[in-house]
Amino acid sequence: MPVEPLSRTEIEARLAELPGWTLAGDRLTRAYRLDSHVAAAAMTVHIARVQDELDHHSDLTLGYNTVSLSVHTHSAGGAVTAKDFELARRVEDLASAHGAH
Ligand SMILES: C[C@H](O)[C@H](O)[C@H]1CNC2=NC(N)=NC(=O)C2=N1
């Protein structure tokens, strides 16, 4: 089933439920800080598993004690869709178990 671009109003309403996530251009983004580089690497692996499960993939960057995500929906012409918010919600739900903040 094709996913439709969300309106700006809908994006802002959904972002209100996801503290720390922002709209940067046409992408949802968030950066997390962790207590160590290995903890950050472990979180990226966990996110990669979720992304394969959802068949939806962010640009996922491992930094020094940081994990950063940037996502939009290629099949919707690069717009933000419900799939992006589904991924963001799943990442938020796993973040605290990794000590991410
Ligand atoms: C064939 C497969 O469903 C597509 O390539 C998926 C994979 N992951 C994806 N990820 C993102 N961010 N957007 C997509 O449109 C997308 N499409």
Image (tube, rainbow, N blue to C red):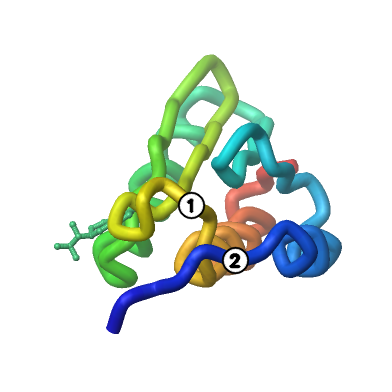
Which amino acid, mark 1? Ala
Q: Which residue occupies 64% across, 60% down? A: 92
Residue at the (39%, 73%) spot, across then down: 3
> Is residue 49 found left or right of 92 in the rendered image?
left
Residue at 54% across / 32% down in the picture? 68
Disc 2, ligand 1: is the CB inside 8 Å? no
Q: Residue at x 57, y 59 (%)?
A: 88
In-image side of 75 versus 69 (left or right):
left
Please, is residue 30 above or below residue 92 in the view?
above
Q: Is disc 2 surrounded by few (<14), some (14 to 19) or many (20+) residues within 10 Å?
A: some
Q: How far across and how far down the image is residue 81, in percent?
A: 51, 64
Mark 1 and mark 2 in contact (Cβ < 8 Å)? Answer: yes
User: Which is more toward the observer, 45 or 29?
Assistant: 29
Q: Quadrant of the N terminus?
A: bottom left
Q: State which quadrant residue 30 falls in.
A: top right
Q: Which residue is mark 1?
A: 79
Front-lying residue, 29 or 99 = 29
Query: x%, y% of residue 8?
Result: 72, 57
- Mark 1 Cβ inside 8 Å of ligand 1: no
In the structure shown, which secondary structural element does the residue marked by tag 1 occupy? loop
Q: Which quadrant does the C terminus fall into?
A: top right
| Ligand 1 lies in quarter | bottom left
Q: Residue furthest bottom?
A: 1
Report the residue marked by disc 2.
6
Image coordinates for residue 74, horizontal then vertical, percent: 32, 50
Percent of width and height locating residue 6: 60, 66
Residue 36 figure quarter: top right
The mark total stands at 2
**Amino acid type at mark 2:** Leu
Whether residue 69 is visible, yes or no, is yes
Q: Is residue 5 above or below residue 28?
A: below
Q: Which mark is residue 53?
A: none
